[in-house]
Amino acid sequence: MDIWEQLYEKAREQYHPGEVTPFIYAHHVVCALESENGRIFTGFCVESCCGVLDLCAERVAALNMYVNSGQTRVKRLMVFRDRPPYGGGSGMPCGACREFFMQLDSRNRNMEILVDYDKRETVALEELLPNWWGTERYENSQKV
């Protein structure tokens, strides 16, 4: 079983869309990521009637990683709804998640994001955020 299949199986465990309350819907987008030390962390999307309270599956997985291990670097990430990424833009993190991962650790620019499960096609985060605005701040802080 390769790492992508492992990530898929872990994320799939989280997929069971449903209402938490009449105001909150969850588990309809799921994510699994591999941290720097090889541990797998998962997350699921939480949407509410008030958009500012929403949490994407990717950020929940990253926060689980940080809270439970103190790690900030992600090696690989997979996100999906009812089936694994199949190309054509499926499996892509939203802009807020892309930004969050870059701010969480500058090395996340190299993380692999799965865009097609069957072909094992990936894209690096830095390809999705060329000329990222925060590079200079990282360079100035010596935490590149």
Image (cartoon, rainbow, N blue to C red):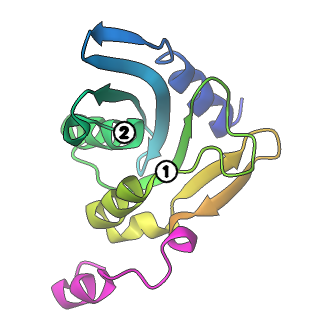
- Checking the image for residue 56, the label placed there is 2
Residue 46, quarter of picture: top left
Give the crowd class for mark 2: few <14, some 14-19, many >=20 residues within 10 Å. Answer: many
* Above or below, 36 relative to 45: below
**Residue 33 locus on image (x, y percent):** 47, 41
Compute the Cα span from label 2 to label 1.
9 Å
Q: Which amino acid is tagged 1?
A: Pro
- Give the quarter of the figure containing the C terminus: bottom left
Residue 141 higher or lower than 24, as above or below: below
Going from N to C along the chain, the mark reached first, 2 or 1, is 2
Q: Identify which residue is drawn at 48% across, 35% down.
A: 32
Q: Is residue 2 magenta?
A: no
82 left or right, relative to 22: right
| Three-letter amino acid code at the position of disc 2 | Cys
Q: Are marks 2 and 1 in contact (CB under 8 Å)?
A: yes
Q: Magenta residues?
A: 126-144
Of the numbered discs in the image, which one, if any, rests on residue 93?
1
Name the residue rendered at 46%, 69% in the picture.
109
Q: Is residue 116 left or right of residue 111?
A: right
Left or right: 86 with respect to 29?
Answer: right
Q: Residue at x 49, y 54 (%)?
A: 75
With respect to residue 87, does 65 lie above or below? above
**Neighbourhood count class around disc 1 (C-alpha, 10 Å): few under 14, some 14–19, many 20 upward:** many
Tell me the residue at 35%/18% (across/down).
25
Q: Residue furthest right?
A: 119
Task: In this rendered view, identify the residue nearer to me: 134 or 71.
Answer: 134
